[in-house]
Image (cartoon, coloured by chain):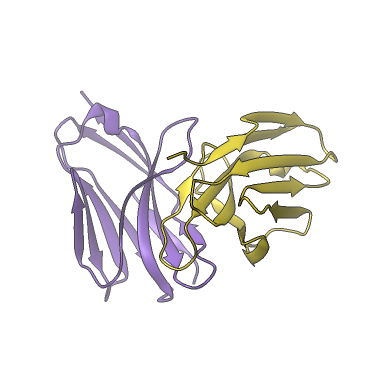
Amino acid sequence: ETGVTQSPTHLIKTRGQQVTLRCSSQSGHNTVSWYQQALGQGPQFIFQYYREEENGRGNFPPRFSGLQFPNYSSELNVNALELDDSALYLCASSPGGGNQPQHFGDGTRLSIL
Amino acid sequence: QQQVKQSPQSLIVQKGGIPIINCAYENTAFDYFPWYQQFPGKGPALLIAIRPDVSEKKEGRFTISFNKSAKQFSLHIMDSQPGDSATYFCAAQYGGATNKLIFGTGTLLAVQP
């Protein structure tokens, strides 16, 4: 069984640029969530996708957007990058909503210069 | 009401000791409580989880104790080993269609040989 995979592992961008991060969900999982983890903090929920539709959003501005594809893989897009966007971006997948456990990938470390 | 409070921030125990990490929540809409273990450079790994209709769950050396009336839950690690040294996060998950996780602030555990 393949776990959650994310790419790239590291990325360096400058302020104002745009970035796309990618996630392949665990086999059989149709729900993907994205989280932002700042250094020394717990992950913060960005949004969730279920069957290609956004299914809930945390307290993040509209410049954070996403997509889910028919194979349940997902992208996180961030426009107009700011210094505070420097963080570890984590993708988690689960076999649906409700009380289903979420399994995380190893994340993409994004650094904004 | 969305907060999950976690303590202590850091913990040092000797090999074989029993570290205990505590968490408290306010929102009764949470109905799934997982613990994650995170090593440097890796994503959070699901360790053990409990639902609020159960007061205790044990998996190997890891035990969750859950007190629904007090809205508190804790993680105990029996016979701790140096390989258990990591950051531990408690979390609370909503049971609705959007099963977003609300994380605690993390506990850095060091198990000394």
Residue at 63% from the left image edge and 40% from the top image edge? A87
Left or right: where A84 falls relative to A102: right
Residue A108 can be seen, yes or no:
no
- Where on the picture, by quarter, is residue A37? top right
Which chain is yellow in the rendering?
A
Give the image location of residue A107, x and y in percent.
56, 38
Residue under the point 51% across and 51% down: A93
Q: On the picture, is B16 further left or further right than B39?
A: left
Q: In front here: B102 or A26?
A: A26
Residue A104 appears in the rendering: yes
The C terminus of chain B lies in which quarter of the figure?
top left
Above or below for A8 versus A50? above
Q: Quadrant of residue A57?
A: bottom right
Residue B65 in the image, given as x and y percentages of width and height = 22, 60
Describe residue B61's horizontal placement relative to residue B88 as left or right. Answer: left
Q: Residue at x 52, y 36 (%)?
A: A106
Observer-nearest of B55 and A113: B55
The number of discs equals 0
Colour-to-chain, purple: B
Q: Nearer the viewer, residue A12 or A55?
A: A55
